[in-house]
Amino acid sequence: MLRKTLTALGILLVLSVLSFGAVRVGITQIVDHPALNAVFDGIIKVLESAGFKVGTDVIIDRQNAQGSVQNAVAIARKFASERVDIVVAITTPSAQACVQVITDRPVIFSAVTDPVGAGLIKQLGRNDSNVVGISDMVPVSTHLRLIKTVFPNAKKIGVLYNPGEANSVTLTNIAKTAAPALGLTIIDMTGTSSGEMVTAVNSVGPDVDVIYIGTDNTAASSIQAIAAAALRLNKPIVAADVDIARGGGLIGFGFDYFQVGVESGKLLVEILKGKKPSELESRLLGPESLMLYINLDLAQQLKVSIPKELVDRANIIVQNGQEVKR
């Protein structure tokens, strides 16, 4: 009982020191999508588990840029002018917008593929700045090996991405570097909107064997239309995100984004308890948070044979219209 009382008193002290009352936390994400919403849910879960009452101790101002970089910049400026105490930026575009205009209070990035390449921090680990966070850099080489396992005769892989998203450009470049060793060629399939991505699938799709989608936010927000176009061409989609795969992909191998939120929430709690971002480490999410998704119904429709050993390792399978978690 004494320990709980001291913890509660400590939280109250932090709250009073930071903002003479409730702490205001601005949370921004580039688009509405299940994976990104799961990040938000994970953050809230950690706050509540740490003893903070959301809505009383911590006031959340949640903003969505609706897929627009201009909106992301406007949200960042809003947070800067309205003096939120801490900012959490989910995805690379939102984090870049916030880091450019907010330098006088903590900024936590979450679900950012390459925070160094995106200019958010100088290095993983500790940085002498107001920025810290969690990277969701996915194992692109593993994805390509996975594609080669399922499709041993595949030669051309179409990578569907928005060239305006730094995270997607990074993943595509990694794929281009890793592909030759596997006898694969990467074909760019680009679009800056849902319509352009569907057009890319229709125009370039016939010339590729498999469509690969990384953690691209534009593709994530329009995956159903993309998947419908791919299915008409009888082209399988392999995704670096399970929620993208759920929208019409054959295979998804990516992070549990609720866990991304949990790890980001831990950083937020540390800052609420008085630590500075420069005292905390920016890091990659560990491989233990990776999940494998396989849609066996779609495999049958596409006449694709999934190796049994891969099915046995899957965390989530879809069969006979039912999603089963294992």
Image: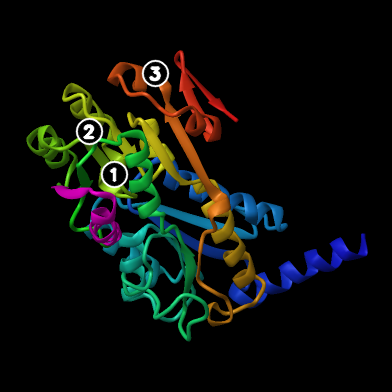
Placement of the C terminus among the 4 image quadrants: top right
Single out the mark in the foreground, 1 or 2: 1
Q: Which residue lies at the image location 49% right of the left edge and 67% below the top edge?
A: 133
Q: Which residue lies at the image location 40% right of the left edge and 50% below the top edge?
A: 142
| Mark 2: few/some/many CA within 10 Å (<14, 14-19, 20+) | many
Q: Is residue 318 above or below residue 111?
A: above
**Of residues 307 and 107, the one drawn nearer to the viewer in this rendering:** 307
Q: Amino acid at mark 1?
A: Ile
Q: CA distance from mark 1 to mark 2?
A: 10 Å
Q: CA distance from mark 3 to mark 1?
A: 20 Å
What is the secondary structure assignment of the residue under circle 2?
helix
Residues in magenta, as a range? 167-189
Principal SS element in the magenta part? helix
Residue picked out by circle 1: 213
Q: Amino acid at mark 2?
A: Ile
Residue picked out by circle 3: 297
Q: Is residue 39 above or below residue 269?
A: above
272 magenta-colored: no
186 magenta-colored: yes
What is the secondary structure assignment of the residue under circle 3?
helix
Q: Position of residue 254 (x, y in %)?
A: 44, 46
Whether tag 3 and tag 1 are in contact, CB under 8 A, the answer is no
Residue picked out by circle 2: 226
Left or right position of 147 against 226:
right
Q: Position of residue 155 (x, y in %)?
A: 20, 42
Whether tag 1 and tag 2 are in contact, CB under 8 A, the answer is yes
What is the secondary structure assignment of the residue under circle 1?
strand
| Mark before the other along the chain sequence, 3 or 1 | 1
Q: Can residue 66 be seen by looking at this rendering? A: no
